[in-house]
Image (cartoon, helix red, strand yellow):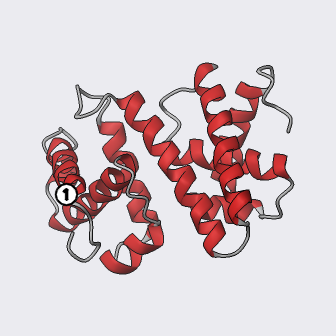
Amino acid sequence: MQILGLSNEVKQAAVALYLDFKDRPIGEYNSDRKNLDIFLVASVSLAAKALGDVRTDQEFESKMFVGREKLVDAEERILKSFNLQDSVVPLTEFVSELARRQIESMAESFARRELVSSDEKEELIRRAYTYLDAAVEKGLAAKITYRGRAAAVMLKAVRSLGIDIPTVDVARAAGFDRRSMEINTSIIDLLLKDSGQDSP
């Protein structure tokens, strides 16, 4: 936590998430020290985003020595485990807030790489929020991860604004491969087709 320079509120939330997850009946992931270390880092990542401390996955990877694939997997397992019983935060609210934070993190990463201007970054975030809210209103299932939601609506926002960011870059920013990206995008597109949000 000191390495990442996170606030006390994030520390407290991360510990609560970690302990809540650690005590759930998930078999082998409770028995291996290395796995628990990975899940602790994932709980920090989730808590930071949920509380508004937007950090990129690259920062967690480089400073905590956890690969993107393992970090994404651990985050998803933590969130899925919340379906088994009442969790620290209601799952639907938690996933929605994380998706919004992921959208911000992705837009910030594009700005740092100078793929978008400051104004374009803000418009990307605004439009992605609009698409996300519309999809949730149409019945977006909780089974779609927060990263999947963020990636799909961000790609839709990029396309609607005519910004030249390749699909693969959007996918990577969310921790996905291109195939997973296409699946999530198809789900969002179907939901938004008749909602008035299917065109720029």
Indicate the position of residue 180 as horizontal and vertical percent values: 63, 51
Residue drawn at x 14%, y 47% is 19
Q: Quadrant of the N terminus?
A: bottom left
Indicate the position of residue 179 as horizontal and vertical percent values: 68, 54
Q: Quadrant of residue 135?
A: top right
Indicate the position of residue 186 as horizontal and vertical percent values: 73, 38
User: Considering depth in this image, is 107 or 146 the residue closer to the camera?
Assistant: 107
Residue 145's place in the image compared with 91, above or below, is: below
Badge 1, how many Cα within 10 Å: few under 14, some, many 20+? Answer: some
Q: Is residue 115 at all visible to an observer of this figure?
A: yes
Q: Secondary structure at mark 1?
A: helix
State how many labels appear. 1
Residue drawn at x 28%, y 58% is 44
Q: Quadrant of the C terminus?
A: top right
Most extreme residue toward the front is 119
Looking at the image, residue 44 sits to the left or right of residue 122; the answer is left
Q: Which residue is mark 1?
A: 11
Residue drawn at x 65%, y 68% is 111
Residue 147's place in the image compared with 109, above or below, is: above
Indicate the position of residue 2 as horizontal and vertical percent values: 20, 74
Looking at the image, residue 90 sits to the left or right of residue 113; the answer is left
Q: Is residue 177 at all visible to an observer of this figure?
A: no
Looking at the image, residue 9 sits to the left or right of residue 145; the answer is left
User: Considering depth in this image, is 33 or 79 the residue closer to the camera?
Assistant: 79
Q: Quadrant of residue 112?
A: bottom right
Looking at the image, residue 98 sits to the left or right of residue 169; the answer is left
